[in-house]
Image: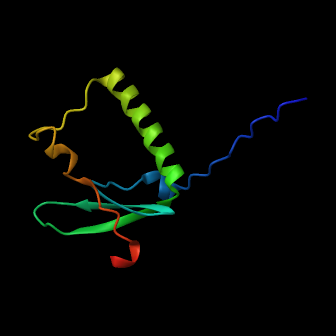
Amino acid sequence: MNKPQPQQIKVQLDDKEAEGIYANLAMINHNPSEVIIDFARVMPPTLKARVLSRIIMTPMHAKLLHKVLTENLEKFEKKFGDIKIHGLSEHSAKTIGFEASNGAKEEEQ
């Protein structure tokens, strides 16, 4: 029996999306069927942030994203050295800029 050949996905990247969006704040919410990540930008001196992009995915895809992001950050650090978060303790670094919510439902926002 022949194994099915893996198909390659052709990904289109238009000019606008290729420019990217700078975000230094991410807020993560979830419910039983979705993980919602809002990317925003906060620029001093204001403390206002505007959501620039919202990504909604299944928990399985979020876990796969976590896995490949971890792998890529490990490769980055092997090539360029440890990523330092200056001026923050190890504990506080986890809550500045990128945070996880307590699973508040999307309707509550």
Q: Nearer the viewer, residue 12 or 81?
A: 81
Residue 25 lies left or right of residue 48; in this view the side is: right
| Residue at the image point whose x is 62% and y is 48% from the top | 11
Viewport quadrant of the C terminus: bottom left
Viewport quadrant of the N terminus: top right
| Residue at the image point whose x is 74% and y is 40% from the top | 7
| Residue at the image point whose x is 55% and y is 56% from the top | 14
How many discs mark residues in the rendered view?
0
Could you say which quadrant of the image residue 28 lies in? bottom left
| Residue at the image point whose x is 13% and y is 60% from the top | 44
Percent position of residue 29, x then y: 37, 63
Q: Nearer the viewer, residue 6 or 12?
A: 6
Residue 99 lies left or right of residue 68; in this view the side is: left
Q: Is residue 2 above or below residue 103?
A: above
Percent position of residue 24, x then y: 26, 53
Q: Is residue 52 above or below residue 21?
A: below
Looking at the image, the residue that sits furthest to the front is 32
Could you say which quadrant of the image residue 74 lies in? top left
Q: Nearer the viewer, residue 13 or 107?
A: 107
Residue 47 lies left or right of residue 68; in this view the side is: left
